[in-house]
Image: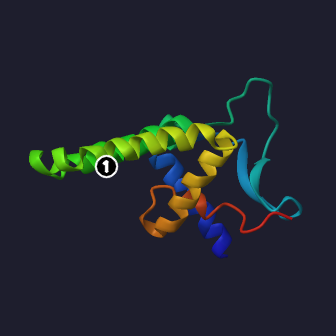
Amino acid sequence: NGEKDDIVIFLDWFHQMGGFRSTAVTISKFVDFGGHGLLAKSDIKPYDILFTVPKSIIITSDKVKNDYFRLIRDKRENYSLSEIQRKESEYEHMETEIQNLLPNMASQDAIIAQRLMAECALGERSLFEPYLRMLPNQIP
C-alpha cells in the first residue's frame, strides 16, 4: 500500500509543478525491470500527448552548473563588502574549481547523478523528494 501512496504523492507533486499526464496512461510498477513506468489504460494513437514535464523539474548538466554558480553568488550576498573583498580569491577559486571539475566529468550523466545524490541527501527537504521516492533502490 505504501507504494501506491508513493505514486499518488508523486502524481500530486508532478501536477503541482505543472506536469501533465494523459488519462490514457497510469504509473505502474514493473518488477522485472526494477522500477516504475507508464502503462497504457486505453488505446494510444500516434502523436497523442501522454505526458509533459515542465522545465522547472528537469535536471540537466547545464542547470546543475548554473545552480552551483548561483549558490556561490548567493553566498557572496550574505557578506559585507569588506568580507567579500577578503574572500574574493576564495570565490574565484571555487568558481574555477567548478568550471574545471564539471566539464571534465566522465559524462553529463555523472553530473546529473551527482545532483541526484545531493538531492537524496536532503531527504524530505528536497524539491524532488516525491520523484526520488519513485526511483528503484537497486537495479536488477
Give the residue drawn at x 63%, y 52%.
113
User: In front: 83, or 42?
Assistant: 83
In the picture, measured across the screen, residue 81 lies left or right of residue 103, that is left
Give the image location of residue 121, x and y in percent: 51, 67
Disc 1 secondary structure class: helix
- Residue 127 occupies quadrant: bottom left
Where residue 10 sits, quadrant-wise, is bottom right
Q: How many labels does the image show?
A: 1
Q: Which of 88 and 43 is in front in this view?
A: 88
Residue visible at 29% across and 42% down in the picture: 73
Residue 55, above or below 5? above
**Horizontal placement of 1 versus 120: left or right?**
right
Can you name the residue that lies furthest to the top here?
A: 47
Q: Where is residue 137 in the image (x, y as percent from the top left)?
A: 71, 68
Residue 96's place in the image compared with 119, above or below, is: above
Percent coordinates x, y for residue 132 in the rendering: 59, 60
- Of residues 62 and 23, the one nearer the viewer is 62
Q: Quadrant of residue 131?
A: bottom right
Crowd band around label 1 with a 10 angstrom C-alpha radius: few (<14), some (14–19), many (20+): few
Residue lying furthest right: 32
- Residue with the mark numbered 1: 90
Give the color scheme: rainbow, by chain, secondary structure or one colour.
Answer: rainbow
Q: Which amino acid does label 1 sit on?
A: Glu
Q: Is residue 114 visible?
A: yes
Query: For the N terminus, which image quadrant?
Result: bottom right
Give the residue displayed 80% in from the left and 28% down from the top: 45
Is residue 18 visible to us here?
A: no
In the rendered image, the quadrant that contains the C terminus is bottom right
